[in-house]
Image (cartoon, rainbow, N blue to C red):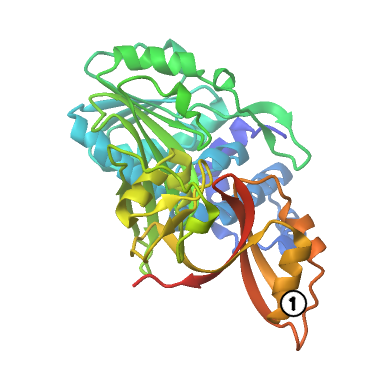
């Protein structure tokens, strides 16, 4: 992937480039070529036109994640991939305020979305970014806020004081190494992060409070003793794992934080804590109850299915499946409920026969805990949508007490 041009980003932040960017209509991929031709014919520099159109495209792509704020930001493709949602940054800033620290180092600030949340919460922020082009974008994105300084430098060489807070969002992509879709290659090993997981932990030793934004796939086994980890989801999508040290820790251990956007665009948060004891999973497929609960993905990522079993009086179908069998529906904002209609062996022929006899010609397939490929299983069902088979069934392919099964369920509204 081509790296963003520092000089062009500076020109887009102010003067002629900013005016050109502000004049662009809402981005339309089909009209971009003609628009670029017209702008160049009007005398605008070709490189500046291309940069402005790239910004317009990135802003359009950013709106689902960043909302109206996207139209005020300078963006880079890699920065957008890792940018924190404003609601998540605002929630995180409240935790920083509760630590009592007055100044936070944002080490590896990227586009500055977390620094923005901290500054809006009244904290002093020093944001450090190693990429000169990205630092230009961050400086422009934070220019309207007091109490924020953006520096270009190596985050690993910053000396964090004992009274300071430190926030790190290590880069999870390799600059200059693109995949087939043009995006820089994602890294998965903790030591491939930049700064590395080792550096993050070293910073946490020196600072009064430290927070790190990590991938939702952060392995539980690497959580340091005495720290707190939150797996955060927004509208069903797990967006990060945040790990906290020292003064930022409220309750050590793992939990889920589930965010749901209300009709007014506000995100409402629910914290899902686990009990002190964990219920054993079912030990016989015949014990499957009348209702099945599926927790939010943040609950699954945090390994806190035990919170669901405790609140519902239910039991997980099998270790690691995430599905919980319960005797009744318990309204929870972070769980979906289904009524169990039938439990079948996980054999396409038997499932096909059951579905056809009852007029089902289409299926929605959910799968967890078995190696079955849902698309292949759907093909093997050989269902015939039509007048005699127009109904749609929901199949849950999973394990119950070690036995692979296909559970036919019907969605239930928890009230």
Quadrant in which residue 255 is drawn:
top left
Q: Is 382 on the left-hand or right-hand side of 194?
A: right
Furthest-bottom residue in view? 387
Q: Is 196 on the left-hand or right-hand side of 25?
A: left
Q: Is residue 200 above or below residue 250?
A: above
Q: What residue appears at the point 39 percent right and 56 percent down from the top-left corner?
A: 334
Quadrant in which residue 149 is drawn:
top left
Q: Is residue 221 above or below residue 323?
A: above
Residue 393's x, y, as percent? 63, 72
Residue 183's x, y, as percent? 69, 38
Residue 253's x, y, as percent? 33, 31
Q: Which residue is mark 1?
A: 356
Q: Is 260 on the left-hand or right-hand side of 19?
A: left
Identify which residue, 299 or 185, lies in the foreground. Answer: 299
Q: What residue appears at the point 74 percent right and 60 percent down from the top-left corner?
A: 38
Identify which residue, 343 or 158, lies in the foreground. Answer: 343
């Amino acid at each position: 992937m081509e790296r963003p041009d520092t000089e062009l980003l500076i020109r887009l932040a102010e003067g002629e480039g900013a005016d050109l960017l502000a004049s662009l209509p809402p981005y339309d991929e089909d009209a971009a070529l003609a628009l670029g031709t017209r702008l160049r014919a009007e005398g605008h520099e070709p490189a500046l036109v291309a940069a402005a159109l790239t910004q317009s495209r990135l802003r359009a792509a950013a709106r689902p994640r960043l909302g109206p704020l996207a139209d005020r930001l300078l963006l880079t493709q890699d920065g957008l991939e890792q940018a924190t949602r404003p609601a998540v940054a605002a929630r995180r800033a409240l935790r920083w305020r509760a630590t009592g620290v007055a100044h936070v180092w944002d080490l590896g600030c990227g586009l500055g979305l977390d620094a923005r949340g901290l500054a809006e919460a009244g904290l002093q922020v020093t944001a450090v970014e190693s990429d000169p082009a990205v630092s230009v974008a961050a400086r422009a994105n934070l220019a309207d806020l007091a109490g924020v300084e953006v520096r270009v430098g190596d985050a690993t060489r910053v000396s964090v004081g004992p009274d300071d807070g430190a926030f790190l969002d290590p880069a999870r992509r390799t600059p200059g190494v693109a995949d087939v879709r043009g995006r820089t290659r994602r890294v998965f090993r903790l030591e491939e992060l930049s700064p590395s997981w080792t550096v993050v932990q070293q910073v946490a030793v020196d600072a009064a409070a430290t927070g790190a934004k990590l991938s939702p796939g952060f392995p539980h086994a690497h959580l340091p003793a005495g720290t707190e980890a939150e797996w955060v989801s927004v509208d069903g999508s797990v967006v990060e794992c945040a790990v906290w040290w020292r003064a930022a820790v409220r309750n050590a251990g793992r939990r889920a934080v589930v965010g749901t956007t209300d009709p007014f665009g506000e995100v409402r948060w629910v914290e899902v804590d686990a009990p002190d004891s964990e219920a054993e999973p079912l030990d016989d497929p015949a014990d499957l109850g009348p209702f099945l609960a599926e927790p939010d993905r943040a609950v699954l990522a945090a390994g806190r299915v035990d919170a669901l079993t405790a609140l519902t009086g239910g039991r997980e179908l099998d270790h690691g499946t995430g599905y919980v069998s319960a005797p009744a529906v318990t309204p929870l904002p972070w769980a979906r409920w289904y009524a169990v209609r039938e439990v079948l062996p996980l054999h396409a022929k038997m499932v096909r026969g059951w579905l056809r006899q009852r007029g089902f010609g289409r299926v929605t397939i959910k799968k967890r805990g078995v190696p079955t490929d849902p698309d292949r299983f759907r093909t093997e069902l050989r269902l015939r949508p039509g007048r005699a088979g127009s109904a749609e069934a929901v199949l849950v392919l999973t394990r119950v007490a070690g036995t692979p099964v296909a559970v036919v369920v019907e969605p239930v509204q928890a009230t």
